[in-house]
Amino acid sequence: MNTLRNGTKTPKSLRGPTLFPCATAPNCLIALRNSTYKRCATGRRYGFVVLGPTILIRGQFNTPTKADHSMPDLSHDPIAQLRSRWVDLSDVDRAREIDTIHRSDVSINQIGRDLKISASLLRHLLLCLQASEEDQNLARRGQISTNELARRGQAAKKRRAEPPPAVVEARRKESASEGADLICNWILKEDLYGPDCIRIITDVCREFKIREENHSLPPLTKHASLPLNVLIQRSKPKRPIDAGEAALSWYAEWLCRWSFYAFEDAAVRDSALKQALERLSGK
């Protein structure tokens, strides 16, 4: 520019100013020639202001921001709150906090990752809440360990999961009645009648009693996925059926095998055999 604001021409000594980089603003170029300059009040942002000549600015520079050392807001992050108070809480109170967060649809694995604690340890702590209030107070006072409290909590949880004794007994009676029907149907299907049926079932009951007293019964493996008719057929003795009196022993061995695997509860099995014996003997 060769004119000033009032329209007069700029003296030759001020024309064609030399461009100087601003000392505090690398992106600014200042036109200086035979002029004075000073730092202005906003010098940290715009560099130097020239009094007189025209200022040619290439661009403003970004003001460096100060690091924010203020405390983060934890009011809406329960996991962060728990992490900040973790060392001040007892194991029981930690378990209560974890349980509250978990009930708000946050998985145990996610809580563990945020707390940098294994999920298995968090689940171990949650077992403490299953114990009685009295046991929890003992743990708070340090009279029992956290592991002992978790063990008591596991036992209490198992007891609560079990149905009442009256319900268990009713289920056993129903299962025994159905088992007696199954045994009677198997007897009829194999064309066994009269005293032969009584002898077969009697021999089986005697065999179970002897083996239970001697603790010689084999380990009971579950066959829940195997249909019952398939289980019965697979339990058939491999040797050929004998003739005469020996045939009754062959059927008794077969019944002993499949009834052992078909009834996982020994009380239900014994009751089913007894009921089947009473039905076939007409009692």
Image: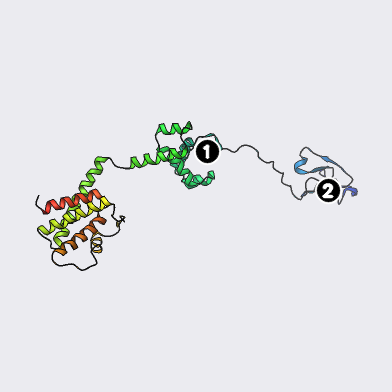
* Left or right of 268, for residue 73: right
Q: Nearer the viewer, residue 220 or 177?
A: 220
Q: Position of residue 133 (x, y in %)?
A: 41, 32
At label 2, the amino acid type is Ala
* Left or right of 85, for residue 167: left
Residue annotated with mark 2? 31
Q: Position of residue 241 (x, y in %)?
A: 18, 67
Secondary structure of the residue carrying tag 2 is strand
Q: Position of residue 100 (x, y in %)?
A: 45, 38
Q: Nearer the viewer, residue 74 or 268?
A: 268
* Left or right of 5, for residue 261: left
Q: CA distance from mark 2 to mark 1?
A: 60 Å
Q: Position of residue 182 (x, y in %)?
A: 18, 56
Q: Is residue 21 above or below residue 190?
A: above
Secondary structure of the residue carrying tag 1 is helix
Q: Is residue 43 above or below residue 248?
A: above
Q: Residue at x 12, y 52 (%)?
A: 279
Observer able to see residue 265: no
At label 1, the amino acid type is Leu
Residue annotated with mark 1? 82
* Left or right of 59, for residue 141: left
